[in-house]
């Protein structure tokens, strides 16, 4: 039996590649930059499986150019880069990698929170630039963390892990905004479910963990930043387009909020003239929240398992569109 052909859009950890090579005829894109759209179309023309990254847009027209495609396995927990409805209509399974990056991402959210609140990167630059002349009673003053109020927007696994850190370590009061109430968070963390405006107005720290979709896109705009405290610290480890960046830059420049810590931007990478990169109270990291050995290995294993299960026509280990079964035509 010939092995099924798959296209893997980047080098991922061996923990996953080994399984993929063993089970498939794998064409692996080894360039560090994503394959151009036309290359994707050509590569997928005779592939049954695709392992994609969040940098690739997988839409209906691309799927139509891949008549044999049966599974798209995304090497990420987020899947806003994939038109899942289009995949489902075409009988294509979609997989993602939840669970294994929860702690790493919550750690990054907390690192950004404390770094932005305590002006750590800005101070480091000050020291490196030779500006440190003496101990300054009025210099580099930031925000306290202990006992303050944390607002979580999107209380899924990662939001909950972030809330646990802030509640357990810093005794913060936890507010959350989510479509659904979360009894465990309310019991375990005394978390309080509030509407969006109340969260903006009452939080000292706002950490975003929402999915990117048509209702959440641009939810952090000037109106939202204006409702925040002037001492607020805003953290985004979810997706860049949740934020209207020009509005965030204005809020930071005009002191509507204190600081921001961003692991994600819109687009990625940001243009070099993006004003957020030049603001001392904005800390930008290159989308590294899941970048730990165990998270990335775990993601590779799940992504490989999803790909192989989809090729066998079996349920995926982490299946975004299980309803595909009822619509399957091929
Ligand atoms: C994800 O998994 O969605 C992250 O953004 C990258 O690890």
Image (tube, grey):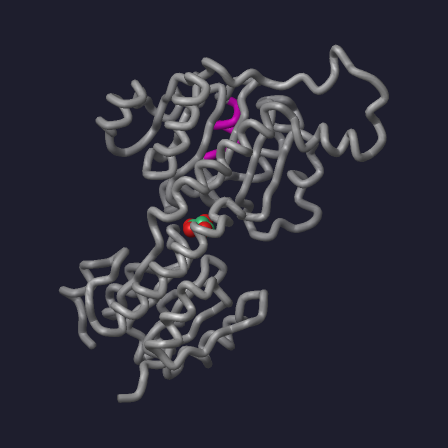
Residue lying at 32% horizontally and 38% vertically, measured from the top left: 156
**Predominant secondary structure, magenta span:** helix
Q: Position of residue 122 (x, y in %)?
A: 70, 30
Q: Position of residue 166 (x, y in %)?
A: 43, 24
Per the image, is 128 magenta? no
Q: Position of residue 215 (x, y in %)?
A: 36, 41
Q: Where 250 falls versus 62 (above or below)?
A: above
Q: Is residue 80 visible?
A: no
- The part of the image, by quadrant, that contains residue 330 is bottom left
- The part of the image, by quadrant, that contains residue 92 is bottom left
Q: Where 297 falls versus 214 (above or below)?
A: below
In this orientation, which residue lies closer to the viewer: 300 or 262?
Answer: 300
Q: Which residue lies furthest to the left in this view?
A: 326
Rendered-image quadrant of the N terminus: bottom left
Q: Can residue 300 be seen in this view?
A: yes
Q: Residue furthest top?
A: 137
Q: Residue furthest bottom?
A: 1
Residue lying at 37% horizontally and 44% vertically, measured from the top left: 211
Q: Where 37 falls versus 197 (above or below)?
A: below
Q: How many labels does the image show?
A: 0
Residue lying at 58% horizontally and 24% vertically, measured from the top left: 117
In this orientation, which residue lies closer to the viewer: 289 or 34?
Answer: 289
In this picture, which residue range is highlighted in magenta? 220-226
Residue lying at 74% horizontally and 12% vertically, measured from the top left: 138
């Amino acid at each position: 039996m010939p092995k099924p052909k798959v296209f893997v859009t980047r080098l991922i950890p061996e923990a996953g590649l080994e399984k993929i090579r063993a089970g498939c005829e794998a064409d692996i894109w080894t360039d560090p930059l994503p394959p151009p759209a036309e290359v994707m179309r050509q590569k997928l023309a005779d592939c049954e499986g695709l392992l994609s990254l969040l940098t690739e847009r997988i839409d209906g027209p691309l799927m139509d150019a891949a008549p044999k495609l049966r599974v798209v396995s995304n090497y990420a927990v987020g899947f806003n880069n994939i038109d899942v409805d289009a995949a489902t209509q075409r009988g294509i399974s979609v997989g993602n990698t939840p669970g294994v990056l929860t702690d790493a991402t919550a750690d990054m959210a907390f690192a950004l929170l404390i770094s932005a609140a305590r002006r750590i990167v800005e101070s480091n630059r000050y020291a490196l630039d030779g500006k440190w002349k003496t101990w300054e009673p009025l210099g580099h003053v930031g925000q306290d963390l202990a006992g303050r109020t944390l607002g979580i927007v999107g209380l899924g696994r990662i939001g909950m892990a972030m809330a646990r850190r802030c509640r357990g370590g810093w005794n913060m009061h936890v507010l959350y905004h989510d479509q659904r109430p979360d009894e465990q968070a309310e019991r375990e963390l005394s978390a309080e479910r509030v509407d969006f405006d109340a969260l903006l107005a009452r939080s000292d720290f706002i950490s975003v963990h929402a999915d990117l979709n048509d209702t959440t896109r641009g939810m952090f705009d000037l109106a939202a930043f204006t409702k925040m405290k002037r001492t607020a610290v805003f953290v985004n480890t979810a997706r860049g387009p949740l934020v209207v960046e020009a509005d965030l830059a204005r809020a930071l420049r005009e002191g509507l909020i204190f600081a921001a810590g961003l692991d994600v931007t819109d687009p990625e990478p940001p243009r070099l003239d993006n004003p957020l990169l030049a603001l001392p109270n904005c800390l930008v990291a290159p989308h590294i929240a899941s970048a730990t050995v165990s998270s990335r290995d775990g993601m590779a294993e799940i992504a490989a398992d999803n790909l192989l299960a989809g090729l066998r026509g079996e349920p995926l280990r982490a299946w975004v569109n299980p309803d595909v079964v009822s619509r399957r035509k091929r």
